[in-house]
Amino acid sequence: MSKNGMATKIHTRIRTDPFTATYELVAKELGRGKFAVVKKCIDKATGKQYAAKFLRKRRKGEDCRMDVFNEIAVLESAKSNPYVVALHEVYETNTEIILVLECAAGGEIFNQCVADNDEAFTEKDVIRLARQILTGVAFLHRNNVVHLDLKPQNILLTSARPLGDIRIVDFGLSRHMDSITEVREILGTPEYVAPEILNYEPISTATDMWSIGVLTYVMLTGESPFLGDNKQETFLNISQVNVDYSQDTFEGISSLAIDFIKSLLVKNPRKRATAEECLDHPWLNLLPHPHSHPHLHSTSASSLDEPETSQSESEPESPAPSPDLDLIESYLTCPGQDTQQPFHLRLMSVQRKENSVITSSFEL
């Protein structure tokens, strides 16, 4: 493992024969990011559908093959995790590496987060999906992997109607942690990054837990807790943990749900609940959680004691429609209030420490 938490040793055989000899690409594009595109494909021999993630090997003039190997290594380590997208096989061309991934048909949970009331998640839905997300993340954390980009666009559903199970996708920013090496990087998606990312403090499994707190807030309310009019305001809200827990925002949502979110949106990473602790939280245990992954037919957030039934299938890795950031871009023009000055100074320290990486993004 390299010093920045990137794993470069993989076990999957890389095929160099023509991808199109085995798979037929379907016209539908499932997702697109800065350096990748995901398309649906069909195995010509079996007729089975997959998601093919095409990753460029050179990015901004640099060889990024090892970055792709890191993503492959994470997927390999999570092979027995039912809530992480499955890697089927890998191809390499002169310009790209292609990951053939399990294809889930339900799309991103983001779609339900911003849906109208009739199609939005109920609290019972969120409890079931949050348990699955946390079960998947707890597995990653036990294997010393942090995702670092958990958000609604990176949680897919095996089926939208009826509501299926989740698949965690897009491990392009993931890192392996150990007890010896500290990893400090500025990466993530602005609304979901933890305060320690902005402070250029060590990354840990707690960094993911902050993102899960934001994710749960969005799933329950349809609102993004820290989103400002610009990145600077968003980062200031994160730094100051400015969160609206008002009755208007959480109308019809249980107080246990709010308590759950509060256990994660804690500035000090050492005081945040772990994934295992979250799974024991009373809110996530309001519903039975049998080994079959139940689908909840409830349409009322208040009736949290009704029986459940289940459904399952499987899906892909989809780069988010909202911007994925390898770096958090420029935001160094703080208004002059005293409460904002420490934030400005911390960002200045990030610029100094990572001068070679992000100075060009700043307007000083």
Image (spheres, rainbow, N blue to C red):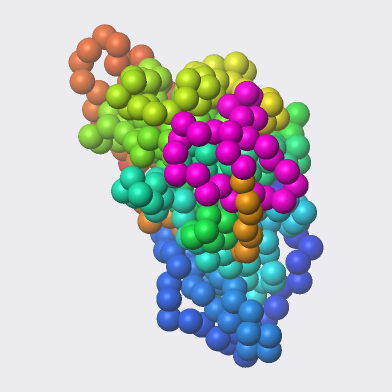
Left or right of 157? Residue 241 is: left
Relative side of 14 to 61, left or right: right
Q: Is residue 63 magenta?
A: no
Residue 341 sits in which quadrant? Answer: top left
Image quadrant of residue 237?
top left
Residue sitting at the far top:
338
Q: Main secondary structure of the magenta part?
A: loop
Percent position of residue 87, x then y: 68, 64
Q: Say which residue appears at 34% left-offset and 36% top-offset.
A: 223
Q: What is the magenta range?
A: 281-307
Total of numbered circles in the picture? 0
Along the viewing direction, whichever of 16 and 267 lies nearer the viewer:
267
Instruction: Kindly identify the residue that appears in the image at 62 percent across and 67 percent down.
Output: 101
- Residue 155: tell me if it is visible: yes
Q: Residue at x 29, y 16 (%)?
A: 340
Specify the quadrant that holds the C terminus. Answer: top left
Q: Along the horizontal axis of the image, is 103 left or right of 112? A: right
